Amino acid sequence: MTQEELQLVLNALKWCHGGEPCGTAEAIAVIEKALANVATNDTSKEYVDEMQKQRHEQELVATVDNNSQKWAEMDGAIAFHLIERHADGWNDIRKMMEEWLSANTPQRTWVGLTNDELTDLFYNTNLGQQSAVAQAIALLKERNT
């Protein structure tokens, strides 16, 4: 892009929707940096790759710190409104939803098979190996669902 094209895009991003900034801060920062580099003729592939890497790293970072929400004491509707109000982007939404889900998902204790049960299945029955494995899986599923 030429410097004039970048300036037009930057102006459109900065003041859209009747003069209100429209949540494009990252794009504005990238274009401002690109304009500075176009002025110095730095449009190398390395620069573009570095800009993409920096933007990708910014997208991965959630902006909501660990909060002191009592997620376990909160029903889904209240959690939804809290997340909607305080999340700043998809990463924050994901982080807060995972916190609520982990606090509200009952933790079960795994019930396995004893050595005697495994011995009975594999050695003391006339089941083939595949049938014994299928029977063991069926028993585990029955006990843990």
Image (cartoon, helix red, strand yellow):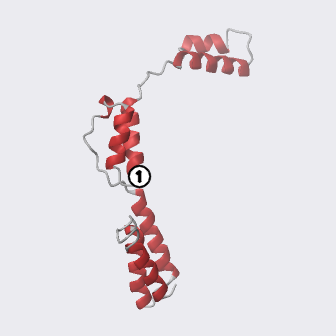
Q: Is residue 56 left or right of residue 141?
A: left
Residue at (54%, 15%) from the top-left corner?
143
Image coordinates for residue 57, horizontal then vertical, percent: 42, 62
Looking at the image, residue 77 lies above or below residue 7: above
Residue at (45%, 82%) from the top-left corner?
8
Image coordinates for residue 20, horizontal then vertical, percent: 34, 68
Amino acid type, mark 1: Asn
Corner quadrant of residue 68 = top left
Q: Secondary structure at mark 1?
A: helix
Corner quadrant of residue 109 = top left
Residue most extreme to the left:
68
Q: Which residue is mark 1?
A: 91
Question: In this rendering, does residue 59 appear at all?
Answer: yes
Most foreground residue, 36 or 78: 78
Most foreground residue, 35 or 19: 19
Q: How crowded is the residue under tag 1: few (<14 C-alpha within 10 Å), some, or many (20+)? A: some
